[in-house]
């Protein structure tokens, strides 16, 4: 059973840092280690800098401009029939899960919008709401795991990182996601 595996996994883990995000997320993001595979001291872990938005390196300009993001003037929670962020239809349901998009671009309410933070169309801007664990997997690198079941279409976390040019990334042996 899946639940039994989760209990076994948790029983072998030791919490190193209770909140790797240091309060920058809505819920703690734990750093854990498997006690059967690693000695518990800080020298065994590579440096980890938790960030909540992409950071450009020298010579790289990110195309995103927060001030150019479309926004709504809704009050409280958005009405999908009148909200300007929902012109192509609502993208999220009341449980904050993505609804069918037919491969269209997804537009959600953001920090420029006037609606409340519990608006169902503000899933990405709402940040992390599920309990997460980060662990070091040796040669495999860092691992992210959710401590709860994830509903289909549920936002988990925004993938952000340092923006490098391809040449620098190859020299530094960094992961490339294209």
Image: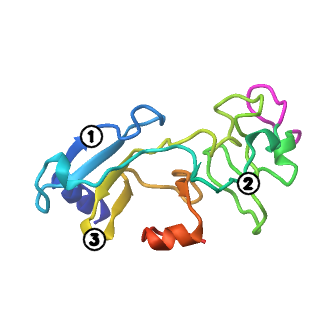
Residue 80 makes an appearance in the image: no
Residue 62, horizontal then vertical, whole percent: 68, 53
Residue at 14% of width from left, 59% of height from top? Answer: 38
Residue at 73% of width from left, 54% of height from top? Answer: 63
Q: Which residues are magenta?
A: 72-82
Front-lying residue, 175 or 152:
175
Q: Which residue corresponds to mark 1?
A: 17
57 with respect to 91 (left or right): left
Q: Nearer the viewer, mark 3 or mark 1?
A: 3
| Discs 3, 2 touching: Cβ within 8 Å | no
Front-lying residue, 121 or 176:
176
Q: CA distance from mark 3 to mark 1?
A: 21 Å
Q: Nearer the viewer, mark 3 or mark 2?
A: 2
Question: What secondary structure is the magenta-colored segment mainly?
Answer: loop
- Work out whether 54 lies above or below 169: above
Residue 77, horizontal then vertical, whole percent: 74, 31
Residue at 11% of width from left, 60% of height from top? Answer: 36
Q: Which residue corresponds to mark 2?
A: 63
46 with respect to 116 (left or right): left
Front-lying residue, 174 or 35:
174
| Circle 2 crowding by C-alpha within 10 Å: few under 14, some 14–19, many from 20 | few
Secondary element under disc 2, as helix, strand or loop, is loop
91 with respect to 7 (left or right): right
Q: CA distance from mark 3 to mark 2?
A: 33 Å
Front-lying residue, 24 or 47:
47
Residue 10, horizontal then vertical, whole percent: 22, 53
Q: Which residue corresponds to mark 3?
A: 139
Residue at 61% of width from left, 72% of height from top? Answer: 178
Secondary element under disc 1, as helix, strand or loop, is strand
């Amino acid at each position: 059973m899946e639940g039994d595996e989760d209990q076994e996994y948790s029983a072998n883990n030791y919490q190193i840092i209770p909140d790797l995000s240091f309060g920058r997320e809505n819920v703690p993001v734990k750093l854990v280690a498997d006690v059967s595979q690693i000695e518990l001291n800080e020298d065994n872990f590579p440096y980890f800098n938790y960030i909540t938005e992409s950071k450009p390196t020298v010579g790289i300009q990110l195309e995103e401009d927060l001030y150019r993001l479309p926004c709504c003037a809704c009050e409280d929670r958005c009405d999908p029939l009148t909200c300007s962020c929902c012109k192509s239809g609502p993208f999220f349901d009341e449980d904050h899960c993505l609804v069918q998009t037919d491969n269209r671009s997804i537009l959600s309410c953001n920090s420029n919008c006037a609606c409340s933070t519990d608006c169902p169309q503000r899933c990405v801007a709402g940040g992390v709401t599920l309990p997460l664990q980060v662990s070091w997997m040796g040669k495999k690198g860092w691992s992210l795991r959710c401590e709860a079941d994830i509903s289909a279409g549920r936002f988990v976390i925004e993938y952000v990182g340092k923006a490098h040019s391809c040449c620098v990334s190859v020299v530094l042996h960094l992961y490339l996601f294209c």
